[in-house]
Amino acid sequence: MKIFLILAHPNTKSFNHAVAQTAAEQLWFNGHEIFYHDLYQESFDPVLSFEEIAKDAQLPEKIAEHCEQIARADGVIVVHPNWWGQPPAILKGWVDRVIRPGVAYEFVAGDGGEGVPKGLLRAETALVFNTSNTEKRRERTVFGDPLETIWKNCIFGLCGVNDFYRRTFATVVTSNEELRKEWLEETKRTVDSFFPPMNRAGEKKKVADTSHG
């Protein structure tokens, strides 16, 4: 399988980087092909220009590469911190420039005026790993967990990716090394669960049923 893995955090020693690296290593161990992008390390330009908005626009080489890879991916993994209930601006800009009409979605004539797009992404599964310094219950009750809405409903759901899983590691600022190690092990298990090992033919390995001894 081809997995598009995208990371958005400026500190190369951050826990986000550790999560992304753990996910990448597990994908590699399981035999998957990885399209890996660290947006800050790539100096990704998040600004969408007017010239790029049109569906048939001539795209810069880097943007065209991202579009081609996300279109070919069988799965997507996103790793980023929760900043003010939103992804970092660089990642929002990536969405603006790469999750574009003709690549990730399209509007179909005769939809009755609802303006609901048809999802075009090939990927069946999307995983989102967030870090946060807000306790989970407070995030839900006080802020309404906006990241869940953004990724599940506003982006992946509309682009045809319906198998969605999100995990928030919190609170990072007060976590100790032992807890962070547990979180990384959980990351590994999660990736392994959604993107299990491949056989030589490039298919998911079948797990033997041992329930009957």
Image (spheres, grey):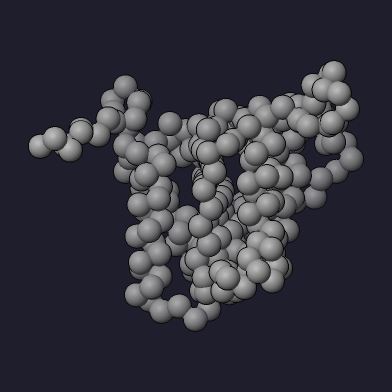
Viewer-nearest residue: 124 or 23:
124
Question: Residue 192, how many percent across, how many down?
Answer: 36, 45
Q: Residue furthest left?
A: 213
If the image is split into quadrants, where does the N terminus sit? top left
Expressed as whole percent of the image width and height from the top left, the position of residue 93 reads 74, 50
Residue depicted at x 35% and y 66%: 182
Depth check: 148 or 48 in front?
148
Count the marks. 0
Residue 198 screen position, x and y as percent: 32, 32
Q: Is residue 153 visible?
A: yes
Q: Quadrant of residue 156?
A: top right
Identify the image quadrant of residue 59: top right
- The quadrant the C terminus occupies is top left
116 sits left or right of 24 in the view: right
In depth, the one of 203 and 18 nearer the eye is 203
Q: Is residue 189 above or below residue 197?
A: below
Extreme residue in the front direction: 212
Q: Is residue 11 visible?
A: no
What residue is at 75 percent from the left and 42 percent from the top? 97
Q: Is residue 139 above or below residue 92?
A: below
Task: Reply above or below: 13 against 20.
Answer: below
Residue under the point 36% across and 68% down: 181
The residue that appears at 31% across and 37% down in the rendered structure is: 197
- Residue 166 percent across, percent down from the top left: 53, 53
- For residue 142, which quarter of the picture? bottom right
Q: Is residue 103 left or right of residue 53?
A: left
Give the residue furthest to the top: 110
| 42 versus 101 height, above or below | below
